[in-house]
Image (spheres, rainbow, N blue to C red):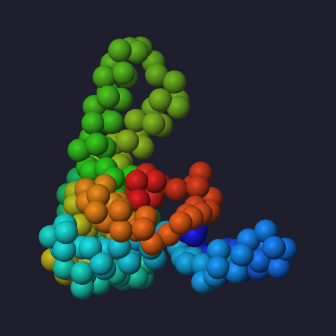
Amino acid sequence: GLTFTRKAAAELADRVRSRLDRLRRSGIASAEETSGDPVISTYHAYAGRLVGDHALREGLEPSMRLITPAESWQLAARIVAAYDGPMGDIGWGPPTVTAAVLALAGELSEHLRDPSGVRAVGEWLETRRAALGGRLPAYVRKMQQSQRAREQLLPLVARYAAEKTAREVLDHGDQMALAARIASRHPQVGLAERSRYNVVLLDEYQDTSHAQLVL
């Protein structure tokens, strides 16, 4: 069973154990069919186990350390403070820029995208804007402004990624993206996982990211 938070995982485990016990007492399922303890964790914890077991398949050391959100913030904040590139479309202070860098880096990882995809969206929007001509609706101008700001964050996102690589660390988004790559590129891993579990329950499936969907 997979869910999003440790609290939800604990609640889900209690519910599954309770239901198995009721099935056993009612005679609907045998003791053999309901034996053993259910394996319940968060999506990220499960991704972490796969990365630890199979990172070498992607040419990475299993010992790569997962950094905490606080460490991620400190690393990104130093990058933002030292950055002297163009920021004309960003009117935020350093803390907000730091949060935006981390958010964009996380979204790229969780949806298995890279910066070229962000730039491609900007080119598509510019093509459509030119085709419209004349005065643009306010929501279109706002959309373009958001896109320009996002593109100006990309060099900061790239520096954040480079720093993590240099330090041989992962954040939660990296971990999920790597687990999804392992799952999609190495069929033998999927075969091994499916042999371990007869039933898989995905909690709040509609809220999964693309990387979690692939995983």
Q: Is 57 placed above or below 204 here?
A: below
Say how many tags the image has.
Answer: 0
Q: Can residue 89 be seen at all in this image of the molecule? A: no
Residue 173 appears left or right of 56: right
Figure check: 49 above or below 136:
below
Q: Is residue 16 left or right of residue 1?
A: right
Q: Position of residue 182 (x, y in %)?
A: 29, 63
- Viewer-proximal residue among 145 and 115: 115
Residue at x 29%, y 84% (from the top left corner): 65
Q: Nearer the viewer, residue 83 or 119?
A: 119
Q: Residue at x 31, y 44 (%)?
A: 118
Residue at (36, 48) in percent of width and height: 149
State which quarter of the image contains the N terminus.
Answer: bottom right
Query: Considering the image in quadrants, where does the C terminus appear?
Result: bottom left
Q: Is residue 26 toward the left or the right of residue 41 in the image?
A: right
Question: Which of the 4 image quarters holds residue 163?
Answer: bottom left
Q: Residue at x 46, y 53 (%)?
A: 213
Asked if residue 192 shows in the view, the reply is yes
Where is residue 194 drawn, in percent x and y?
A: 43, 64
Q: Quadrant of residue 49?
A: bottom left
- Percent position of residue 209, x then y: 47, 55
